[in-house]
Amino acid sequence: MPQFLGTPGFPHDGNERVGVLLVNSGSPDSASVRDIRRFLGSLLSDPRVVELPRWLWLPILHGLILPIRPLRSARKYREMFAAGRSPLLSLSESLRAGLESELAQRVASPVPVAIGMLYSSPSIESAILGLIDSGARRLLVVPLFPQYCGVTTGAVYDKVAGVLGRLRWAPELRYVADYHDDDGYIEALRASIAAHWAAHGRTGHLLLSWHGVPSAYCDKGDPYHKRCHATAQQLADALRLHDGEWSVAFQSRFGGGSWLRPYTEEVLESLPARGVHTATVACPGFAIDCLETLEEIEVEDRARFLRAGGTRLDYVAALNARPEHVQALSRLVALHTRGWIGAAAARAAGAFPRVVSSS
């Protein structure tokens, strides 16, 4: 018989909470080659990430990529871990704490918030079990990927379903699949870029850079490409930018084949030749700063831009735990928990007495 995870100590007193699970991709536990290899192995073995047949891909992954790539990545991770811990983990914890505090001010009953990572610690399983231990019987999953993509949001579906499938008493579930056009999210992006320009001065061009995916994924129906462009247009409108003052590009290619274009590094290298010598890069698809933003954009792509003749490249930090981001997520939680949070608070207060049969 299958062994299911139980909750034998659950009080069953009717005081059932709503729990919020924030999910991101994750980061190596440390900058050691071993931890980097473990993280990359988990990430790149997910069929959502690489859709090649397992019999073809896994020997390549374990025979060629994992023995070499962690060695090449170690320096970048050491620089990023200079403070002793992954910025993604630290910033995610700050966001979690901020959201939990904001929700405590908005609703009467406690709403615990947890962070789970797809490919590292803390795991999605440990986060869900922690929420259940805190009394949550209703679970709202919020992938921190504003634009739906099967590679990311779809992978969260898979992991959450896998955990719930092993629980003896699975919680009621709701899921935020996408918030690419949410007003609060767009306003948070606008405010972060406007604040950067107010502090440092505006540049000649705004480049909105998104994590790339193979073009074939979108050709087969993934909405990610269209979602990125829709967010970009709304953000440009909110900033009152004109055509030519901003553009969209895609970064972080892995392996060969055709990926979503144009490529970020190629756009940046072309700008000086077009007379644009100062530029700002923002990455609206990254809710939290990580290697792809702090190293790839802020270090490597800045160097490319300067070598091509540019004089200034600014990177606008991800929304991270900015108050506007916390507020946007709290409104998103309120929207997707309608009928849950109020009912939980009323039940805890005894507003819904038990019905006793007269027979």
Image (spheres, helix red, strand yellow):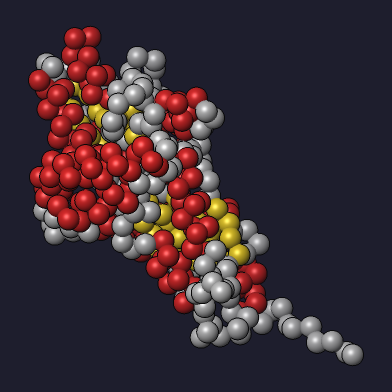
Question: Residue 3: x percent and y percent?
Answer: 51, 74
- Please state, as top left, top right, bottom left or bottom right, where the C terminus lies in the image: bottom right
Residue 270: percent from left, percent from top:
22, 14
Q: Is residue 218 above or below residue 134?
A: above
- In this rendering, position of residue 317 left or right of residue 110: left
Is residue 18 visible in the rendered structure shown here?
Answer: no
Seen as rendered, the residue at the extreme bottom is 359
| Residue 77 horizontal/vertical position (percent) | 15, 48
Q: Is residue 303 above or below residue 57?
A: above
Count the marks: how many?
Answer: 0
**Residue 8 visible in the snapshot:** yes
Q: Residue at x 59, y 79 (%)?
A: 15
Residue under the image location 42 percent in, 38 percent down: 53
Name the foreground residue: 37 vs 2. Answer: 2
- Looking at the picture, tell me which residue is in the foreground, 88 or 344: 88
> From what the image shows, is residue 84 above or below residue 282?
below
> Which residue is more in the foreground, 339 or 293?
293
Q: Position of residue 42 (x, y in %)?
A: 32, 51
The quarter in which the N terminus is drawn is bottom right
Residue drawn at 35 percent across, 14 percent down: 244
Query: Residue extending furthest top?
Result: 274
Residue beneath the point at 73% across and 82% down: 353
